[in-house]
Amino acid sequence: MKITLKRTEEQLELIKAMASKNRDTAYEAQAALGSFMGPILAEVINNAPAISNLFSSLSFNPDDNPSIPLDLYYDITAADYVTVYSQSMPGGLPTNHVAPTASELKFTTYTLDSAVSFDKRYAAKSRLDVVGKSFTRVAQEVLLKQERTSANLLLGTLADTQAAATSHTALSAFAGNFLLGDLNALITLSKRVNSSWSGGTPDTKRNGVTDLLVSPEVVEGIRGMAYNPINTETADHTIPAAGNDAWVTAPDEIRMKLFNDSGEMASFFGVNIMEIWQLGAGQQFTNIFAGLGAMGGRTDLVLGLDLSRDSLFRAVVLDSESGAEFSLMADDQYSVRQQKIGYYGSVEEGRMVLDNRAVYGVLV
């Protein structure tokens, strides 16, 4: 993520005005730049390849009492009661709320914010690079908080499904390895979870998994299928032993595609791949899931999502003046003696999972 300000005469004069000894002139220039940069930062954050942007956005005005009519997001033949997962504070673990499908879902929004400052002399010298990097830091910090909030919600939802009649998590055939057979089994599991209201075949069939969030080690294993065996069982359904003739490799076409796409793997077996460095043995998101007692003795997690289902939502409050999702204001806490220029940025949002059938996992 990088924000670069164009070196135009208008922007140079605006940046210089921020360092003016006249307080009114300096504050007006700071406020003008904040109003200009707020929508830009919102666009940068919303277009970043991150977990938080897997959620669909619903916009509300600041004075609204936001709610979602659940009956519009569930099939008319669905169960009378559904479980919705949401958070009451940023970064907190999700709570499940059982609600009738014909009810209005009220949800809580919270503020994610960041503040940054830089020396006035950089503005006086029109150092656009310093100003641009300051705004980049604001966007990075807010995005980091969104990532942790989104991950906690998804991981908590997945952990809760393990108590259901059909768990949404499965074990990989070989500990420490995620192979084609594991993805195949995950797709089958999603079909069972997505049965109709009567427990049979739904009128609209779906694979149930469109995206995988995986660690770099899992991606390494997928790349390794270009030259390693991929089968997870022999003809008699036993695990093949090392060096056994039962070991087989993937077809040449698949191995060649894996070899050619090894630099940047966007999809595998028709499922989108998103590499998340916070997943993996001993990493942040994996530790959170382990803290919920849901790892089953394994060390890594593959998180599967069904983004074709209307389930993951982010309710965001629009700024009353600019109409943007992100508000960037001049921070007036600094006195003349401190010789600093500050900005305060924030976004008010709330996230929820309306249907846990959109979340799956494989313990690796």
Image (cartoon, rainbow, N blue to C red):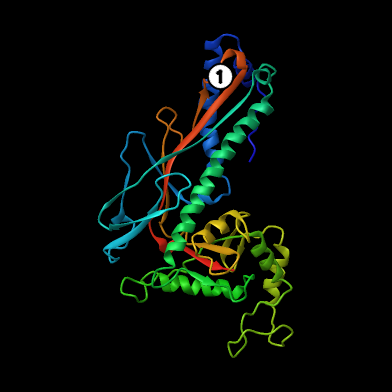
**Taking the image as drawn, is residue 346 in sight?**
yes
Q: Position of residue 346 (x, y in %)?
A: 49, 34
Q: Quadrant of the N terminus?
A: top right
| Residue name at image x 41 percent, y 49 percent | 87
Q: Position of residue 243 (x, y in %)?
A: 74, 84
Q: Quadrant of the C terminus?
A: bottom right
Q: Is residue 190 above or below residue 248?
A: above
Q: Secondary structure at mark 1?
A: loop
Residue 142, quarter of picture: top right
Q: Position of residue 102 (x, y in %)?
A: 25, 56
Q: Nearer the viewer, residue 237 or 165?
A: 165
| Residue 211 in the figure: left or right of residue 225 | left
Type of residue at label 1?
Tyr
Numbered marks: total: 1
Q: Is residue 201 above or below residue 356?
A: below
Residue 224, quarter of picture: bottom right
| Residue name at image x 69 percent, y 83 percent | 247
Return the residue found at the far top.
Answer: 22
| Residue name at image x 68 percent, y 67 percent | 221
Q: Which residue is mark 1?
A: 334
Q: Is residue 193 above or below residue 245?
A: above
**Taking the image as drawn, is residue 326 in sight?**
no
Q: Position of residue 353 (x, y in %)?
A: 41, 55
Q: Is residue 254 above or below residue 317?
A: below
| Residue name at image x 69 percent, y 82 percent | 248
Residue 160, quarter of picture: bottom left
Within 10 Å of disc 1 (Cα), the crowding (few <14, some 14-19, many 20+) is: few
